[in-house]
Image (tube, helix red, strand yellow):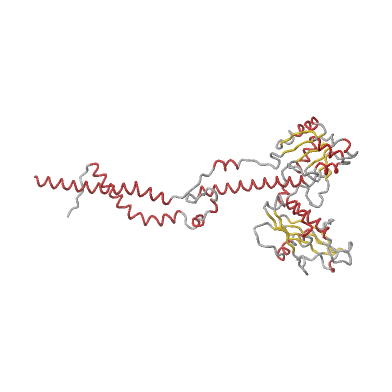
Amino acid sequence: MAGGSGGADAADDTRTARSLAALSFAITVIAVGVPVWLKTTEIYRAAIPYGGIAGLQELELRVGDGARLEVLAENGPAAERLAAGLAPLLPDCRLDGRSFTEAERGRLAAAADPWAADDALNSVGESDHLRLIVLPERLVPSAAAPVMFGRYTDVLVTPTVGAEQLAALLRQTVVGDVSDAVATRRVRSAPAYDLLVGAAGRLLEPVIERLRPLANISVKSQHLYHADLGVRPGWDDTAGEYFLSEEQLSLVVTPLEARLGASVSGRPTLQFVVYVPSPAERPLHLRPAGAADAFLSPRWGGVQVYNPPAGQETVDARRVVTVLVTQLRLLLGVPEPPLEAVVRPAGPSGLRGWELMALRRLRAVENVESARRNLASLAAMLEQISNIVIDDSRAIYDPSMLALLYFPDDQKYAIYIPLFLPVSIPVLMSLRSIWGWARGAPEKVKAE
């Protein structure tokens, strides 16, 4: 009996030692091995404000949001009354009114007409916001329009101007959203552009300098000899001229684009073509008839037909640049001057101050919209890909992203399962025996 009891005790001790060894191994794997594996394979993911990004999608932006409009008049109460009348009509803008300063009064004293007043008030530099100048009575011509858009950032108005009329004109130009037609033809916002022109690139320097606060523009020139438009013009016996119909104009751009050597770059390229017909096809005009003989291709550029005077083969560069600047304005989305108001010529720069201001606000809204869409797409991608690195500053350019494109989760599991499954099976089986030992269940002995 003693020998049998001693054998049973020895067997129990052996089982206990074996169970404790298995338990310690399982604890080591679960408490140490798994955390170490998770820690060494974890991916750093910076906190992403998903709620803030989602809130941006509900934000409605307008060109006039937060625009500052300052009303200036000879006396403060008159300026404040006009500002108060405009406030409910332009709720997105910040309006205030004040009287002229002594320096401004001194400049106006030497002015003899509205345009002279425009030059005088901006002689020391343009304002960084739109100013509504209520002209003194002596500077108002007898048949003057109530609203006159100056060359700078000032809109000149008569003392009798109506707030409704003025607000409507401002919405059409500076603080209003663009129409669908303008949005369709304007080139996308970019920090730099390439202009491919056929002639007179040097005369564009004032325009390029004026646009420098918005974008860096590089002008490139190209000349093609013995080239045609790819379509055969018609002949009008009555007018004695060749012509291209409106239906043919849509067929001109593709052949021209194939011949032009636009450089390959990340910057948008605007192409402005000046076509000089051969002597056998002159004069060549566009139908319907237009004074400029030019047409615009949205987001691509413009084409103008130039017929040299009889006996000449040279191109009038200033005439060409005038048309080119008009086309460039349309492609950039510069607001068109309202027909109901008097607008001062823009001068050599081709852009008035208030037009540049409107274009700046339009591009700002467009950039915010683009950033909002990109953030939404990026947030959706980061939520779908759980093992992507999110750095604090440059998540989208992290080198680990390239490997993740070819190493999805299913491939990762296919690699790790054959490695860890053979090790895991003995551990899981030992847990079963440990559970039986802890419950005091008798050990099963294999029959010999």
**Residue 206 makes an appearance in the image:** yes
The number of discs equals 0
Left or right, 103 with reference to 194: right
The picture quadrant where one finds residue 125 is top right
Residue 183's x, y, as percent?
A: 71, 49
Tell me the quarter of the image containing the N terminus. top left
The picture quadrant where one finds residue 79 is top right
Left or right, 98 with reference to 398: right
Tell me the quarter of the image containing the C terminus. bottom left
In-front residue for pair 326/219: 219
**Residue 340 makes an appearance in the image:** no
Residue 64's x, y, as percent?
A: 71, 40
Q: Residue furthest right?
A: 142
Q: Residue furthest left?
A: 1
Q: Residue at x 58, y 40 (%)?
A: 55
Residue 11's x, y, as percent?
A: 17, 48
Q: Residue at x 77, y 39 (%)?
A: 131
Residue 433's x, y, as percent?
A: 25, 47
Left or right, 19 with reference to 261: left
In-front residue for pair 383/116: 116
Left or right, 441 with reference to 55: left
